[in-house]
Every structure is written in structure tokens, then in C-alpha cells.
Amino acid sequence: MSAMPSMAPVPAGLDTRAQLSVDNVTLQYKTREQLITATHGVSFAVHRHDRFILLGPSGCGKSSLLKSVAGFLAPAAGRSTSMAAPCASQARTG
């Protein structure tokens, strides 16, 4: 017996694209003394009707990741895309 539930076939015409996609996002902050990596290589997709939770200890990068998705913090690497609106946060170049 399999521990994984079987996946039902996707009905024709159903939109299976992710509403929000975060691909290999690395976020960094620069202080006077050092470069701090808030997240490294984070990837996930949120589909229509999904419930998605960012869970982790204080200081692990949850708020930084939300700032990046909202377009307030550009990632050092990777990108975020949304079907609702373009995310302004794309990897810095140069």
C-alpha cells in the first residue's frame, strides 16, 4: 500500500499555472561590517486555492521573502513571478 495519495487527473480547461512562483531566490543585506544572507536558493509555487504558510524561527528570512515578492527587496539571485501582477523584484545585475 502506498503512503502517497493518488493524484486525480486534471480536468480539461483547468488552469494549472502557479499564481505565484518563487524560483531560486537568494536575499542578502549589507551592513557596515558584513554581507548577511537572509535566504539562499528558495523555490516554491502557490497555485489557485492553495493555502501556503511561511514557517520558521525568528530571523530565518520569512519577512524578507515577503518583501521580495511584494517588490520592496530585490533578490541577489533568482526571481518571483505572479499571475496577478508582475513582481518588481528580479535579481540584481552587476
Image: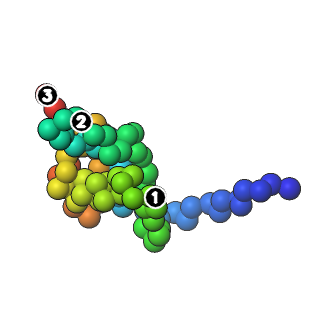
Q: Nearer the viewer, residue 2 or 70?
A: 70
Q: Residue at x 19, y 35 (%)?
A: 33
Asked whether the residues under the numbered discs 1 and 3 touch, taking CB atoms below 8 Å apart as contact, a structural biologist would say: no
Extreme-right residue of the structure: 1
Query: In this rendering, which labeled residue sits more in front, label 1 or label 3?
Result: 1
Which structural element holds mark 1?
loop
Which structural element holds mark 2?
strand
Disc 2: which residue = 35
Q: At label 3, which amino acid type do we have?
A: Gly
The disc, 1 or 3, on the residue closer to the chain's N-terminal end is: 1
| Residue 1: image location, x then y, percent | 86, 56
| Residue 30: image location, x then y, percent | 18, 40
Asked whether the residues under the numbered discs 2 and 3 touch, taking CB atoms below 8 Å apart as contact, a structural biologist would say: no
Q: Residue at x 47, y 69 (%)?
A: 51
Q: Quadrant of residue 71?
A: bottom left
Q: Nearer the viewer, residue 13 or 68?
A: 68
Q: At label 1, which amino acid type do we have?
A: Gly
Callout 2 environment at 10 Å: few (<14), some (14 to 19), or many (20+)? few
The disc, 2 or 1, on the residue closer to the chain's N-terminal end is: 2
Q: Residue at x 24, y 36 (%)?
A: 35
| Residue 27: image location, x then y, percent | 28, 43
66 displayed left or right of 33: right
Q: Quadrant of residue 54?
A: bottom left
Disc 1: which residue = 56
**Which quadrant of the figure contains the C terminus?**
top left
Extreme-top residue of the structure: 94
27 displayed left or right of 13: left
Which structural element holds mark 3?
loop
Q: At label 2, which amino acid type do we have?
A: Leu
Total number of numbered labels?
A: 3
Q: Nearer the viewer, residue 38 or 83?
A: 38
Q: Is residue 54 visible?
A: yes
